[in-house]
Image: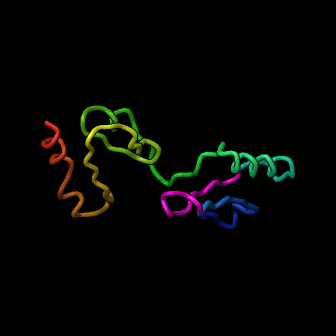
């Protein structure tokens, strides 16, 4: 869960019951009191907590124009348009070779 010895004591809720099939992680950062831990767990069951995403935050430049670079929370498919998505790793040589230029060509 990404903790090191200096982080202890630590707590995280790992939700395995989600649509993506992965683990959604909800790290706890409050005080270690009964009241605050109870409130954290209650907020989880009430759907108030936001899962921790191991991702960069999208900038306004990423989301401007017809070709968008989505990251973490900006990845939402709730529209009625046709969409082409490339999932890639920025360190991957093949991904770099393909590049983004093909997408600018396709949307024009």
Q: Which of 9 and 70 is in front in this view?
A: 70
Residue 75 lies in what quarter of the image?
A: top left
Residue name at image x 82 percent, y 53 percent: 32
Q: Is residue 63 left or right of residue 99?
A: right
Q: Nearer the viewer, residue 8 or 79?
A: 79
| Magenta-colored stretch includes residue 21 | yes
| Magenta-colored stretch includes residue 61 | no
> Quick one: which residue is furthest to the right in this view?
34
Residue name at image x 14 percent, y 43 percent: 106
Q: In this view, does 37 lie to the left or right of 60?
A: right
Give percent across and percent down for residue 88.
31, 58
Give percent across and percent down for residue 53.
52, 52
**Quadrant occupied by the C terminus:** top left
Give percent across and percent down for residue 17.
59, 61
Q: Which of 16 and 89 is in front in this view?
A: 16
Q: Is residue 35 left or right of residue 51?
A: right
Residue name at image x 59 percent, y 63 percent: 16
For the magenta stretch, what is the residue range? 17-28
């Amino acid at each position: 869960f990404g903790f090191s010895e200096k982080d202890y004591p630590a707590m995280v809720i790992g939700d395995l019951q989600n649509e993506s099939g992965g683990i959604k992680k909800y790290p706890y950062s409050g005080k270690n009191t009964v009241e605050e831990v109870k409130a954290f767990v209650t907020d989880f069951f009430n759907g108030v907590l936001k899962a921790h995403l191991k991702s960069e935050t999208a900038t306004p430049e990423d989301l401007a124009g017809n070709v968008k670079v989505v990251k973490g929370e900006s990845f939402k498919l709730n529209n009625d348009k046709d969409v082409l998505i490339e999932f890639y790793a920025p360190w991957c040589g093949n991904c770099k070779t393909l590049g983004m230029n093909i997408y600018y060509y396709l949307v024009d």
